[in-house]
Amino acid sequence: MTITMHQLERLFLYVGLFFLITPTYAQSPTVSIISPAPGEVVYGDSITANVRMPDNFILGQDGYLYFWLDAPLERDSSNAVIVPEAQHTFAQVTSGLHTLWVELVNQNYASLSPKVEAMVEFETVVEGLAGPGGGPGPVPPQTSGGFLSVSSNTVAVIILIGVAIVVLWYLFGRHKKVSPTKKT
C-alpha cells in the first residue's frame, strides 16, 4: 500500500486540527490526608493530621489549609482551624468515631473553584475508655474513591482521544470498495 502526497497532506491536516481543537486542561490542585488513614484506630487523645499538598502550591504564600474535626454540616472559616502548614495536631480528642476534613483555600481565605478538599474517617481510643472486651471499639469501614474516582478533565481527554481515533479510522483506515468488473 502506498500513500500519496495528497493522503499525507490530509493526514497532517487532520492531526493538526485534532491538536488545535483538543482542549488542554491545567491540572487542578488536589489535597489528600496522609494520616490518620481511613479506618485507622488512633490510641490517645491527640491526633496529628498530615496532608499531602500539590507541588505548585506554597502554603502561606498561595493560600492556607482549613482543618475541621467533627465539623457540623456547614463547614466555613468560622468553625475551621486555619493553618499555613500541611500538619495540625488536635488535642483532647475524645474516644469514638471522628471525621476530619481539610480544604485548600486561596490567600484571601476563599475556597478555590472548584473546591479542593479531602475527608477521612477514623477512630480514637483514649486510655481507660476502650471498647467492649477491653479492646478498641469497632473500626469504621475504609472509604475509597470508587470506580470513577478520576477527574472530569481526565474523562474529557479520554473521550476526545477516542473520538479522534474513530475519525482517523473513518478517514484513513477504511478499505475502499472496489466495484466488480464486468466479464465479457
Image (tube, grey):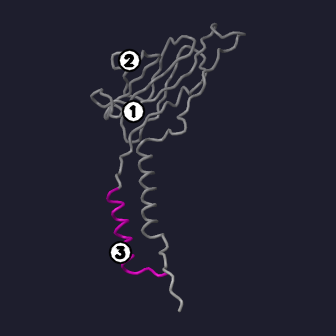
Q: On the image, which quarter does residue 137 sit in?
A: top right
Decide: marks 2, 1 in contact (CB < 8 A)? no
x and y percent of residue 89 in the render? 47, 20
Residue drawn at x 43%, y 26% as measured from the top left = 102
Q: Earlier in the sequence, mark 2 or mark 1?
A: 2
Q: Position of residue 11 (x, y in %)?
A: 39, 71
Asked whether 47 or 121 is in front, the reply is 121
Q: In the rendering, at what x and y percent does residue 164 appear?
A: 42, 59
Q: Which residue is mark 3?
A: 9
The label shown at residue 62 is: none
Furthest residue toward top = 128
CA separation in Å, label 1 and label 3: 45 Å
Between 177 and 130, the residue placed more toward the observer is 177
Amino acid carrying label 1: it is Val
Q: Nearer the viewer, mark 2 or mark 1?
A: 2
Q: Which residue is denoted by mark 2 in the rendering?
A: 74
Question: Disc 1 marks which residue?
Answer: 116
Residue under the image location 37 percent in, 42 percent down: 56
Question: Which residue is outermost to the front?
Answer: 184
Q: Secondary structure at mark 1?
A: strand
- Is label 1 in contact with label 3 (beta carbons under 8 Å)? no
- Residue 33 vs 42, above or below: the answer is below
Q: Residue furthest right?
A: 133
Please tell me how many numbered marks the rendered image carries.
Answer: 3
Segment tinted magenta in the rendering: 1-21
| Front of the two marks 1 and 3 | 3
